[in-house]
Image: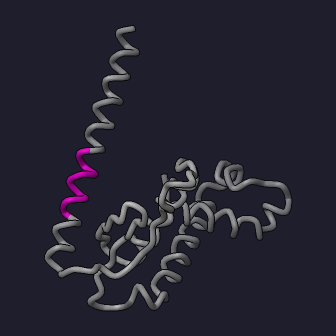
Amino acid sequence: MTDPRIEAALEAAWSHTTQYAGGMSFAQYEDKSLYEANEFRRAIVAALAAADASDPLTNIKGVLWCVIITGPDEVHAVQDYATGVRKARELNEWLARNNKPDDGAPVIYALVDEWPWDEESHAKDLVRQEKEEAAMQNRREERRIAELEDRKDG
């Protein structure tokens, strides 16, 4: 799966093409002209990268970034500002879909901010998260394998 930003930008750009005006979806265009469709996709990716590079916040040197989750007041280090924006957006989208409002519950949302502690703690938190993500991926893979084996046996 590609970055949702790329897919959204691709869809937006495609809607301004003559092929789109003629009723052709991008998927149909890919089937018809794979090389040209890939060129179009590469141009969109390059345009997004250029836009990200021109963002003044991404060019600040020496700033350590994090995602702060209000409500439970969690702080998670991120590699850079762009990663923080992506992770905060993904979490907020997940919360909007899955978190049921409750009058007594705190409001939960994620935002990007500067890491409040030192470089060493930032680096340690990145390593901790990497280990947790690897463990979660292993558990998912183990469940997937078990499900496949159950289907095969059943």
**Colour scheme of the rendered structure:** one colour
Q: Residue at x 40, y 65 (%)?
A: 69
Q: x, y percentage for residue 113?
A: 38, 79
Q: x, y percentage for residue 60?
A: 36, 91
Q: Residue at x 26, y 89 (%)?
A: 62
Q: x, y percentage for residue 85?
A: 45, 72
Q: Residue at x 31, y 66 (%)?
A: 76
Vertical placement of residue 145 versus 19, above or below: above
Quarter holding residue 40: bottom right
Residue 95 in magenta?
no
**Could you say which is closer to the camera, residue 3 or residue 24?**
3
Q: Residue at x 66, y 48 (%)?
A: 31
Task: Give the farthest residue toward the right.
Answer: 22
Q: x, y percentage for residue 134?
A: 24, 49
Numbered marks: total: 0
Q: Which residues are magenta?
A: 127-135
**Could you say which is closer to the camera, residue 3 or residue 17?**
3
Q: Quadrant of the C terminus?
A: top left
Left or right of 25 in this view: 40: left
